[in-house]
Image (cartoon, rainbow, N blue to C red):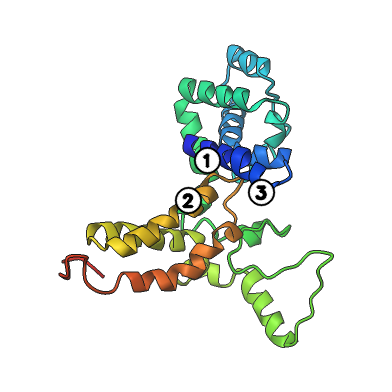
Amino acid sequence: MLGGVLAFFVWAVPVAEVLDVEKSEQQELNAFAQPIQQIAYSYSTGILNERDTAYLESLGWKAPESYNCELGDYARSSMAEMSNSNRLKAWVYVFCNHPQESIEGFLLHTNDAWNPYSWINYWATDKSGNETLLAEVRYDEPAVANSKIPWLFEKLQIIANEISLQKIPILALIVSLPAYLFAYFFMLLNSAYCKKQSAFIVLLACLPIVATGYLGPGIIPRYFLCIIFSIPFMLFTQIGKTSSGQTKKGAL
């Protein structure tokens, strides 16, 4: 997680400056999504004592007005007025003093990336459109629907928004983000085990994209679309012989 924050600074300082990217406070806060969520979760459990909150407030931290374990936007204001160095200090302090709550906060925040069936009831309980459905079909203003095949668009909306597939065991995995991430990690490890060097290098190059999704403000499908769409091509990398020319036992 610390590596993810450091990677942001590599982008935000030298790279963004060279590309003349406009600075954004929200962008900085998104880089600290995990620290924000872990501290907010620890605060919500009541584990932080008066000494803890006094130290955090001395760094500029404010108690979050609200907290959502799966989306960092709600508690983002708690670190809005802090310097980056103080954000790191606050995070390290809470993690060192309350490691269990910090880890729990991380697991809750990333639940949608590792729990295959965490998606089943999303649209049954949340009709606001929380950007959590993999097969989502919706649009917001100023966008308008202009389908050339209206009946097909309507059918896709029903499939996507009425969670019919998500209710069917096994088939639900087709529209479950964790299933695709598990497939990616399996192929990455399989490439290493079977000594498929070319495949391993290609798959390893995708790891920063996956890691960025885990460390972001929420596990949102659009962050992982490039991985999902690449799964069929990744499967091709698992076919064939190892780098030594021998088909290793256990290879796909």
Residue 150 in view, yes or no: yes
Task: Using the rendered image of the protein, determine whether residue 33 is visible from the camera's viewpoint.
Answer: no
> The residue under label 3 is which amino acid type?
Leu
Q: Is residue 143 left or right of residue 159?
A: right
- Which labelled disc corresponds to residue 20? none
Please tell me whether mark 2 sits on a helix, a strand or a loop.
Answer: helix
Residue under circle 3? 19
* Nearest the eye: 148 or 106: 148
Q: Position of residue 215 (x, y in %)?
A: 54, 44
Q: Residue at x 68, y 75 (%)?
A: 157
**Residue 50 spot, x, y in % from top left:** 62, 13
Please determine whether, in this image, residue 219 is positioned above or below residue 86. below
> Closer to the observer: label 1 or label 3?
3
Asked which secondary structure carries label 3, the reply is helix
* Residue position marked by numbered label 1 in the rendering: 7
Residue found farthest to the right: 142
What residue is drawn where x is 44% and y is 59%?
Answer: 181
Query: In the image, what residue type sits under mark 1?
Result: Ala
In the rendered image, the vertical position of residue 23 relative to residue 187, given as above or below: above
Q: How far is mark 1 from mark 3, CA to CA?
A: 16 Å
Tag shown at residue 208: 2
What's the residue type where badge 2 is placed? Pro
- Residue 25 is situated, as x and y percent measured from the top left of the image, at 72, 38
The quarter of the image holding the C terminus is bottom left
Whole-angstrom CA distance, mark 2 to mark 1, is 10 Å
How far apart marks 3 and 2 lie (CA) works out to: 20 Å
Q: Is residue 239 above or below residue 198?
A: below
